[in-house]
Structure formats: structure tokens, C-alpha cells
């Protein structure tokens, strides 16, 4: 059948151009989505070793409130391989988790969209649905053996060092706990709960930024508590005991973290100076305390926190304190720990902050 509708040559050209533009736009959108999802390589297939056999007679409750604990690194004294050994994957899991950093992460928007999909589960919190695509994508990344963010993925930049979106790993942890609690088979529940602990171990592994460590600690605690509940319910009392010991270590480490940070904090000593400029009124020996922590703490994250405090002293301390703080930073910039050295160098290179920026950094000041 012949159509009586005719298209002029001019109209045909316009239609063709419109189609090309539309197709081009679709290709751009598709390419953008592809770039977003291929910003990091796929996680290699990995195996996860079985937990170590539990010798109940060898389990002990570490005395975190005893005087000797003051010199302990804030790490688990109980072997976490009893609950959840790390996987064998060879990729750096930090490449994937760092891609969701709010400022520089190529998948930041995707992470925020995932958080908007969360639902409330009583007794667990805000979680993603069990088959959420991002939750499933996260699983093999928790089977990797290492997680490094600094400076492999995110730069070390003194007080302005960026962190990834840590609400996401907390959400994954809660989501796997919620899914595991619904599992009929003991093995399926344990697979989810152990993944939560592996995630926490990975976040604590690098030991650079305090908040990363605290989120990792929280993941280990909720994973251990979930193992305890299910193991006790199923009569696996040796496993329940080991999980209880691990879960009991977490609150002590969190509280001691707060105590160690508070001990070297300079914010309480900030005062208004001449012309409204902030000054520091530090007690005697405080700079030396910062130097000692920055140089000798067994935990890298506390060294970094002290270095940033020294940075503040080098800006607005007394003349004598500024000199001492800068000398300490210069010595630390040559430290054998490359992360510590890079942090100190970044602090030396940054210009002093104006008061409004200090307010943002330190929060509301006295």
C-alpha cells in the first residue's frame, strides 16, 4: 500500500539530525554510566578460609581496664581468625570503597542513591534489601585480603584529609546481619555474619584515620554479636563463647579511643585573641605530650591525630610552642612510616586557617 504522506527533503534532513543527536545523547549517557560502574576493577574471585578451631580452654577475657592496658595497641587481643579470617583476594578493597567518597568519589551519587533505598528493620536499623545490587556488589570486596585508602586512593591532606562515605559500610554490615538473621541454614547465617567481621577488619587494617577505625570496630562488634546469638540458639556453645569475648572487647576499645583522643585534644584551650584572632592557652607539657604521641603511639591513627594537633599549635600557639611544634612536624616528615611522614609534610605545607575555617574544623569553640 502506498502512503499519501510525503516528507520534504528539508524535513527529512532535520529528522535525521534529530535522530543522530538523540542517539549521541544516549551513547553519552550510556558511556557515563559505564564510566561510573567501571571506575574500579571487578573484585577477583577469592576464597575465604575456614575459621580456626576454637580451644575453649585457651580463651581469655582481656582486662582492658587494668593498668597494663594503657600501653596496649587498641586492637583485638582475641584472635579474630577464630570467627572470620580475611579472604584471599588480591585486589585492594580500598579502590572500591573509596569510589563512594562524597567529594571526589566517582560513584558518590550511586552510594547516596543506595542509602535512599534503605528500610528500617527492628533491632537492626536501616538496611538495604537482601538482593540490593550494591549490597551484592560489595560482597566479593569483603573477600579481599587488604584495604588501603591512603594515599593509594585518597590523598593525605592534613586536617582536610577526605574520608569515604562510611555510612555505606555500616549499612552493608547491618544489611548482612539482617539477612543472616532470616537465614534458615546455620551456614548461610554464618556466611553473612562473618562477612561483616571481615569488613570491619579491612576498615581497621590500614590504621590511618580514626573514624575509619571506629566504623570498622562497630562492624566487628555487630558481627560478633550476631554470631553469638545464632550460635547460642543452635547450641554451638564454643563458638558463642568466642564471639562473646570478641564482642566484649569492642566497647573497651571504643572508650579508650575516646580517652586517648581527649588527652591530646587542643580545642578546649582555644581562646579569642587580639582582634578576635584565635589563640591557644595550652597547659605546660601539652606540646611535649603531642610530640610523644605523634612519635611513639603503637597505633598509627593516634599518631596522625597528634600530628594534626601539632599543626594547629604551629599556627596559633605561643611563639615558643609554634617553634617546637614545627620542629616536631619537620622531624616527623622524615619518619620511616611513609604514611606518618606524608601526613606531617601535608601539615607543614598547609597555610594557617582563618577563624571561620577553624570553627568548621573543630566545631563550636569556647
Image (spheres, helix red, strand yellow):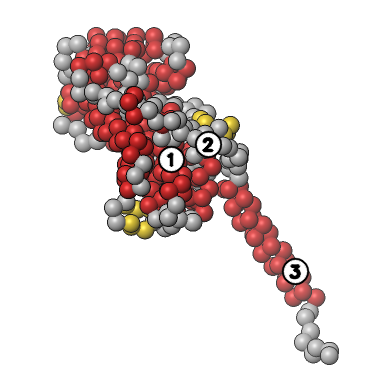
Q: Secondary structure at mark 3?
A: helix
x and y percentages locating residue 60 in the rendered image = 29, 25
Image quarter for residue 29? bottom right
Q: Secondary structure at mark 2?
A: loop
The residue located at (49%, 56%) in the rendering is 131
Q: Secondary structure at mark 1?
A: helix
Q: Quadrant of the N terminus?
A: bottom right
The residue located at (37%, 52%) in the rendering is 181
Q: Earlier in the sequence, mark 2 or mark 3?
A: 3
Of residues 122 and 282, the one drawn nearer to the viewer in this rendering: 122
Q: How many marks?
A: 3
Q: Tell me the distance, in whole angstroms, between the alpha carbons under discs 1 and 2.
A: 10 Å
Q: Earlier in the sequence, mark 1 or mark 2?
A: 2
Q: Tell me the distance, in whole angstroms, between the alpha carbons under discs 2 and 3.
A: 55 Å
Q: Which mark is residue 194?
A: 1
132 w.r.t. 1: above or below = above
x and y percentages locating residue 5 in the rendered image = 77, 87
x and y percentages locating residue 215 in the rendered image = 35, 37
Viewer-nearest of labels 1 and 3? 1
Q: Which mark is residue 62?
A: none
Residue furthest right in the image: 2
Q: Which residue is mark 3?
A: 16
Are the residues tagged 1 and 2 within 8 Å (C-beta)?
yes
Of residues 294 and 56, the one drawn nearer to the viewer in this rendering: 56
Residue density around tag 2, few if under 14, some if 14–19, many if 20 or more, within 10 Å: some
Are the residues tagged 1 and 3 within 8 Å (C-beta)?
no
Q: Which residue is mark 2?
A: 48
Q: Tell me the distance, in whole angstroms, between the alpha carbons under discs 1 and 3.
A: 57 Å
Q: Quadrant of the C terminus?
A: top left
Are the residues tagged 2 and 3 within 8 Å (C-beta)?
no
Amino acid at each position: 500500500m502506498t502512503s499519501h504522506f510525503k516528507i520534504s527533503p528539508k524535513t527529512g534532513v532535520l529528522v535525521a539530525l534529530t535522530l543522530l543527536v538523540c542517539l549521541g545523547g544516549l551513547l553519552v549517557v550510556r558511556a557515563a554510566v559505564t564510566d561510573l560502574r567501571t571506575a574500579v576493577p571487578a573484585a577477583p574471585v577469592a576464597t575465604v578460609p575456614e575459621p580456626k578451631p576454637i580451644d575453649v580452654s585457651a580463651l581469655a577475657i582481656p582486662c582492658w581496664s587494668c593498668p597494663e592496658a594503657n600501653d596496649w595497641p587498641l586492637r583485638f587481643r582475641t584472635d579474630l581468625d577464630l570467627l572470620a579470617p580475611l579472604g584471599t583476594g588480591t585486589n585492594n578493597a580500598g579502590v572500591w570503597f573509596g569510589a563512594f567518597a562524597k567529594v571526589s568519589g566517582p560513584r558518590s551519587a550511586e552510594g547516596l542513591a543506595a542509602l535512599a533505598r534503605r528500610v528500617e528493620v527492628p533491632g537492626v536499623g536501616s538496611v538495604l534489601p537482601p538482593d540490593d545490587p550494591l549490597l551484592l556488589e560489595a560482597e566479593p570486596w569483603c573477600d579481599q585480603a587488604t584495604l588501603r585508602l591512603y594515599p593509594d586512593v585518597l590523598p593525605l591532606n592534613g586536617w582536610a584529609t577526605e574520608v569515604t562515605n562510611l555510612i555505606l559500610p555500616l549499612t552493608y554490615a547491618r544489611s548482612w546481619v539482617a539477612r543472616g538473621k532470616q537465614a534458615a541454614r546455620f551456614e548461610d547465617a554464618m556466611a553473612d555474619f562473618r562477612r561483616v567481621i571481615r569488613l570491619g577488619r579491612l576498615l581497621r587494617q590500614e590504621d590511618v584515620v580514626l573514624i575509619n577505625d571506629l566504623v570498622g570496630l562497630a562492624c566487628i562488634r555487630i558481627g560478633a554479636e550476631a554470631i553469638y546469638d545464632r550460635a547460642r540458639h543452635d547450641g554451638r556453645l564454643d563458638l558463642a563463647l568466642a564471639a562473646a569475648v570478641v564482642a566484649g572487647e569492642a566497647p573497651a576499645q571504643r572508650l579508650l579511643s575516646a580517652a586517648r583522643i581527649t588527652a591530646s585534644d587542643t580545642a578546649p584551650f582555644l581562646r579569642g585573641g587580639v582582634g578576635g584572632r584565635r589563640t591557644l592557652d595550652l597547659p605546660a607539657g601539652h606540646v611535649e605530650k603531642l610530640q610523644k604521641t605523634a612519635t611513639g603511639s603503637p597505633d598509627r591513627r593516634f599518631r596522625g591525630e597528634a600530628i594534626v594537633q601539632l599543626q594547629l599549635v604551629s599556627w596559633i600557639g605561643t611563639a615558643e610552642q609554634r617553634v617546637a611544634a614545627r620542629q616536631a612536624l619537620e622531624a616527623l616528615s622524615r619518619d620511616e612510616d611513609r604514611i606518618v611522614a606524608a601526613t606531617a609534610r601535608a601539615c607543614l605545607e598547609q597555610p594557617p586557617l582563618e577563624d571561620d575555617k577553624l570553627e568548621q574544623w573543630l566545631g563550636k569553640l569556647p
